[in-house]
Image (cartoon, helix red, strand yellow):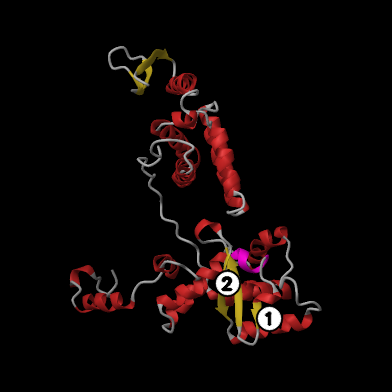
Amino acid sequence: MGVYRSKKTGRIVAQFQFRKRRFKKEGFKTLQEARLWEAGMRLEVGASQDQTLSISLQQAATKYLSYCQPRMKKNTVRQKAFVFRSLLAFIGDDVPVMSIKRVLLEDYLQYRAGQAGNKVANRDLQDIKAMFNWLIKRELMDGKNPCNPIERFPEDPYIPYIPPADDINKVLAVADSEERDLILTYYHTLARKGEIAFRLQWEDIDFERRTIRLFTRKRSNGELQFDYVPMNATLARLLKLRSERCTQTTGHVFHFSAHQLRGMMARLCKKAQVKPFGFHAIRHHVASVLNASGQASTKDIQALLRHRRQSTTEIYLHVVGNRLYDVLSVLDSCTPSHTLGSDGVT
């Protein structure tokens, strides 16, 4: 059952069974044409008896995006919408979700991988799978998620660029006072990009307890949650001076537009003549500095980064354990002489 090419005739065949009746047609020009016929016939013969067949892909995507809208960031919802539009365009018609099979999704993902790379295809798979899970959970479709058996494409590992301290200092040197305060606040809080520039308010800062309240949606269901982060002496002094200069301490601590923030780090890096890096790279840099200091455990850094899993924190540290250097030092005393030149260099 399903859509296939006949080994005997070489023709493309579509067939399915519904309520003990068998429906079959062959001679299609393409697999996609056969799947569309199957989808239409399933809807035609089963819509009156089975309401789960009546919801189309476009209707399903619209319902799912409406659910996501108040729960996720705008960019996340925008990306999901783009994926569903791409899938609809690839299929060429608004078919019932119950007619979408694994093979069709694999064809789409193969197309996306060839068009935009394996990483993009894997991200699309994740978004499509999430929509089907949502539909099944709300009984808007029956059966299993057609994405479940689909294997992810292999990806090259992402190695984030971590700027050296000298480059950060050069950027601070060319920044104006407002930009410098913003960058240093990111530095001393290890905050994510959206947690300071647009969200931090004076009421989130407690100078007596020396804490900052940071809000994030990077938790389950996209709920807005907050954590208290300690302020060191440098940050407390910086923010205290800002509060004294500020005539009103009931609003936001920083006042940058989205446009100003978007191009700020690229412009400053170009002006400082250093390799470009962004606010998130500063977060990676500070985590590595704390780890290299020997005064912070992985648990400490995890708390400052506000990760729920230690494995996520370990991605940020990018270090080789000191004990491994001790282990490999054993080879210093027993290196075969023939591997070295007369001057001791390979």
**Residue 231 % position (x, y):** 59, 82
Name the amino acid type tagged 1: Leu
Tell me where residue 80 sits by quadrant.
top right
The residue that label 2 is drawn on is 167
Q: Could one spot residue 173 in this view of the protein?
A: no
Lower sequence index among marks 1 and 2: 2
Where does the magenta region start and end?
Answer: 193-198
Name the disc covering residue 118, or none. none
From the viewer's perspective, tell me whether residue 270 is left or right of residue 318: right
* Residue most extreme to the front: 49
Q: Mark 1 vs mark 2: give the one in front.
A: 1
Residue at (41% x, 83% y) in the render: 294
CA gap, disc 1 and disc 2: 24 Å
Question: Is residue 289 within the magenta segment?
Answer: no
- Judge the density around disc 2: few (<14), some (14-19), many (≥20) Cα neighbours within 10 Å: some
Looking at the image, is 253 positioned above or below residue 86? below
The residue that label 1 is drawn on is 239
From the viewer's perspective, tell me whether residue 51 is left or right of residue 17: right
Tell me where residue 314 sits by quadrant.
bottom left
Residue at (25% x, 76% y) in the render: 327
User: Which sits in the foreground, 196 or 15?
Assistant: 15
**Residue 333 % position (x, y):** 20, 79
Residue at (35% x, 16% y) in the render: 22
Q: Secondary structure at mark 2?
A: helix
Q: Could one spot residue 331 in this view of the protein?
A: yes
